[in-house]
Image (tube, helix red, strand yellow):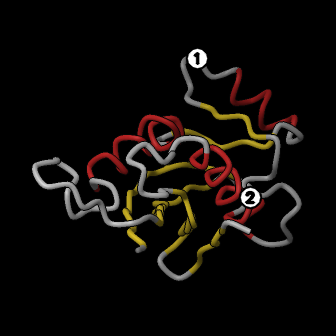
Amino acid sequence: MLITRRLEFDAGHRIPDHKSQCRHLHGHRYAIEITLSGNVIDKAGDAENGMVMDFSQVKELANAHLVQEWDHAFLAFSGDKAIVDFLNSLPNHKTVILDRVPTAENLARIAFERLDAVYRDIYGNNLQLEQVRLYETPNCWADARRA
């Protein structure tokens, strides 16, 4: 069985080597969809009975381990020295330094890598993260999937 929870957050970024407008500082209303697989829990009287995982718990874990950090932050590539220096000069600015250029593809991969360690089989129902879909815009997204 597959289940998916969608969350949204706002963040800024830039793609330094892009040949068009994305090389400029700008922001997006990102959406992230977290898809988990597992067996439906069949334990009468258990709060998770009939679920793969409670959607509220999917949200809670994603917020705690990713979304709260990225929401209303500027996602900057560590190799984009001028921007990193500029952002670091702003008092109390929420900046997240990444080891990769913050494209939709790389953000989806980073999110998958981080969340894969979070969604573990705690119910004995073979729960695991299958996919992270990151929408940069309503029409553009990247999927990071389990290999």
Closer to viewer: mark 1 or mark 2: 2
> In the rendered view, would you say 45 is above or below 65?
below
Q: Residue at x 38, y 47 (%)?
A: 123
* Percent coordinates x, y for residue 93 in the rendering: 56, 26
Q: Amino acid at mark 2?
A: Asn
CA gap between label 1 and label 2 equals 27 Å
Figure check: 138 above or below 35: below
Which quarter of the figure has residue 89?
A: top right
Mark linked to residue 91:
1
Q: Nearer the viewer, residue 49 or 139?
A: 49
Q: Is residue 67 left or right of residue 45?
A: right
Residue shown at the point (37%, 50%) measured from the top left: 58
How far from the left and from the top, in percent, is residue 137?
A: 52, 72
Q: Position of residue 95 (x, y in %)?
A: 62, 32
Q: Residue at x 47, y 56 (%)?
A: 127
Mark 2 crowdedness (10 Å alpha carbons): few <14, some 14-19, many ≥20: some
Residue 40's label in the rendered image is: none
Crowd around label 1: few <14 · some 14–19 · many ≥20 (10 Å): few
23 horizontally vs 29: left or right: right
Instruction: Quarter of the image for the N terminus: give it.
Output: bottom left
Q: Looking at the image, is mark 1 or mark 2 earlier in the sequence? A: 1
Of residues 24 and 135, the one nearer the viewer is 135
Question: Height in image: 133 above or below 9?
Answer: below
Q: Quadrant of the C terminus?
A: bottom right
Secondary structure found at label 2 = helix
The residue drawn where x is 10% and y is 49% is 45
SS label for mark 1 = loop
Image quarter for residue 16? Answer: bottom right
Report which residue position mark 2 lands on: 106
Total residue callouts:
2
| Left or right, 134 with reference to 59 | right
| Amino acid type assigned to the residue bearing label 1 in the image | Pro
